[in-house]
Amino acid sequence: MKTQKELIAKLGNPYTALKTFEKKWMEYWDIPDDINKEIPALPNKVYMNYLIIQPFEDTMRELIATGLHKEIKTWDGCFNVRTKRGQSGISVHSWGIAVDLNAAWNTFHGKVSWSNEFLDVWRRNGWICGADWSKASVDGMHFQGDNFVPA
Ligand SMILES: [Zn+2]
């Protein structure tokens, strides 16, 4: 995982320079129709850091190909400039490099509803899964794309 300092150095600071950050990194991505058809929970357009668009699309396509996409029931957001829940520090959602899914079934610090096969597709595609974090910080809804931010 990248530190807050590394993310600020690479992507800028969405708190102190939001417009500059958005102009440089954020994109309205029109989710391809065939993906929307298979996963109706996803919005037609998402506002994402462009660094995670291709990995996200690849992950959705692999989930569809394996039938695991049926586990996705709700889209719970990507870009959100905020601090981490219950902590100081900037949430990675502030850089638009994380997505939340099925929040109602994967509450913060609560249970994880995903199958291991589903999570494996994300892991294989380079995502950090909040479901893999220790009991004290588990965040099953959360998939984060630090690995797509160049070093
Ligand atoms: Zn999240």
Image: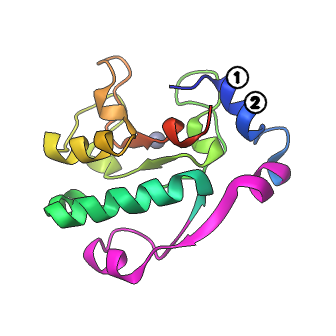
Amino acid marked by disc 1: Lys
Residue beneath disc 2:
9
Q: Secondary structure at mark 2?
A: helix
Confirm whether the magenta stretch covers residue 26: yes
54 or 93: nearer the viewer: 54
Asked if residue 73 lies in the magenta stretch, the reply is no
Mark 2 Cα-neighbour bin, 10 Å: few <14, some 14–19, many ≥20: few
Taking 120 as reference, is 12 left or right?
Answer: right
Q: Are marks 1 and 2 in contact (CB under 8 Å)?
A: yes
Which residue sits at x=67%, y=44%? Answer: 81
Name the residue: 22% across, 41% down.
Answer: 120
- Identify the element where label 1 is drawn: helix
Residue bearing the label numbered 1 = 5
Residue at (47, 77) in percent of width and height: 44
Q: Amino acid at mark 2?
A: Ala
Q: In the drawing, does residue 45 fall left or right of residue 120?
A: right
**Which quarter of the picture shows residue 135?**
top left
Q: Position of residue 143 (x, y in %)?
A: 40, 42
**Residue 106 placement, left or right of 48:** left
State which region is magenta: 20-46
Count residues near mark 1 (Cα–Cα under 10 Å), then give few for <14, some for 14-19, many for 20+: few
